[in-house]
Image: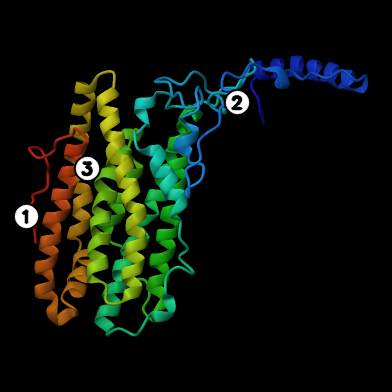
Amino acid sequence: MTLVSEDVSRSDIAEDAERAAYLEGLSEGRWDLRWLHDDRPAWGAKAALRPGVGLTLKATNQVEPYGRIEARAPGGSMAPRGCVTEEGLPAMGYTYNSKYQVWAENVESLYDEAVSRQWDATRDIPWHDLEPLPPDMERAMCQVSTMLTEVEFIAADFPAMWSWQMNQHFHEVKLFLATQAMDEARHLEVFRKRALANGGGLGIAARTTERALASIRAADSYIKGSYMMHVLGEGIVLDIFRAGEFLSPTDVEKKIFRMCMQDEARHVSYGTMHLKYFLEHHPDPVEAKEELHAFADAAEPIIFRVFTAPSVIEPFAVLAGEGVDGIESGFEAIRILWVKIVEEYLRRCERAGFDRRGRCKVGTAAPF
């Protein structure tokens, strides 16, 4: 097995000779000390602390030149942006080396918020307050929890699929995506725990849900995946969380949905603003927008179809109707939710400069 290329091997030979000479010099009291005398342009400048908050990522980016983010990454190594680099650093083979491909103007503040609002699914949920529910309500809550356990971890897999392909120059995006992966791991944990915490259990995994998740993983570029994941998919889930908090039978579920909601809102905000930045800074914005519109034409029916599966809409209708006997009135509430979900999605697209009102492939009226 070859661990390094031939070119790197030749470089290593020269480096080994240099290292040997250095080590020999150490034994004679000769030091290198180039790191001590390098010319740092911002020497003496300090990042500003925010009283009561601390040292934020955004504050460190206000120290020049460290916060200067180039439209095209100047290198391909893991070297921290703004540091002094030696010659011959190995390239990591990044695919995404342009700012417009990954950036969002709010990503710094979203990361700062994410790390300050982490919560614990073991101790921060009042599990001891759970009380027995009527069997139909418990089954409905467990089925909703099963579906959310199923869909939430795709949003952890997603950043893992793409962040390693992003140039280190845009470390803010990579950091934020790492918090997204942690958020979604916690969401899987908390909904799985809810399904198992009150005498119920896991329910049915729907075929339409699994196909939607597979389509997100199959996206052939980061912008397409981000649109499908953050703007479309997680946007719908955010509305489901809001409805879940309202429909929850106990304060335990309300707390779960409320905590997950604050996380999901960050992911949707990043995706919306990334789509906006991508379209505004793409070298050929007209062609890029039309390509994304064609992709959205196919993606919208796939994702919205999840909300027409009986194992998804019926449990919500039971919760809304406070039992199977009230499922008919519960469906009226779910129809209202559908309208809200579609409208919120269209507003996100408009905010990103990606108007889908005349092209959206799902109707604003519920199909059930």
Instruction: Give the percent coordinates (x, y) of residue 67.
Output: 47, 27
Local SS, label 1? loop
Instruction: Give the percent coordinates (x, y) of residue 334.
Output: 14, 64
Residues at badges 1 and 3 in contact (C-beta under 8 Å)? no
Within-10-Å neighbours for mark 1: few <14, some 14–19, many 20+: few
Q: In this view, does 250 lie above or below 87?
A: below
At a point 28% along the width and 83% down the height, the residue shown is: 135
Q: Quadrant of the C terminus?
A: bottom left
**Earlier residue among tags 2 and 1:** 2
Q: Which of 333 and 293 is in front in this view?
A: 333
Local SS, label 2? loop
The quadrant in which residue 346 appears is top left
Q: What residue type is labelled 1?
A: Ala
Q: Distance between the residues labelled 2 and 1?
A: 61 Å
Q: Which of 8 and 244 is in front in this view?
A: 244
Q: Which mark is residue 44?
A: 2
Q: How far apart are marks 1 and 3 (CA)?
A: 18 Å
Q: Which amino acid does label 2 sit on?
A: Gly
Instruction: Give the percent coordinates (x, y) of residue 182.
Output: 46, 52
Q: Which mark is residue 299?
A: 3
Give the side of residue 78 with respect to residue 22, left or right: left
Q: Which of 208 and 225 is in front in this view?
A: 225
Instruction: Give the percent coordinates (x, y) of residue 260.
Output: 35, 59
At a point 86% along the width and 22% down the height, the residue shown is: 23
Give the side of residue 286 with respect to residue 152, left or right: left
Within-10-Å neighbours for mark 2: few <14, some 14–19, many 20+: few
Residues at badges 2 and 1 in contact (C-beta under 8 Å)? no
Q: Which mark is residue 365?
A: 1
The quadrant in which residue 189 appears is bottom left
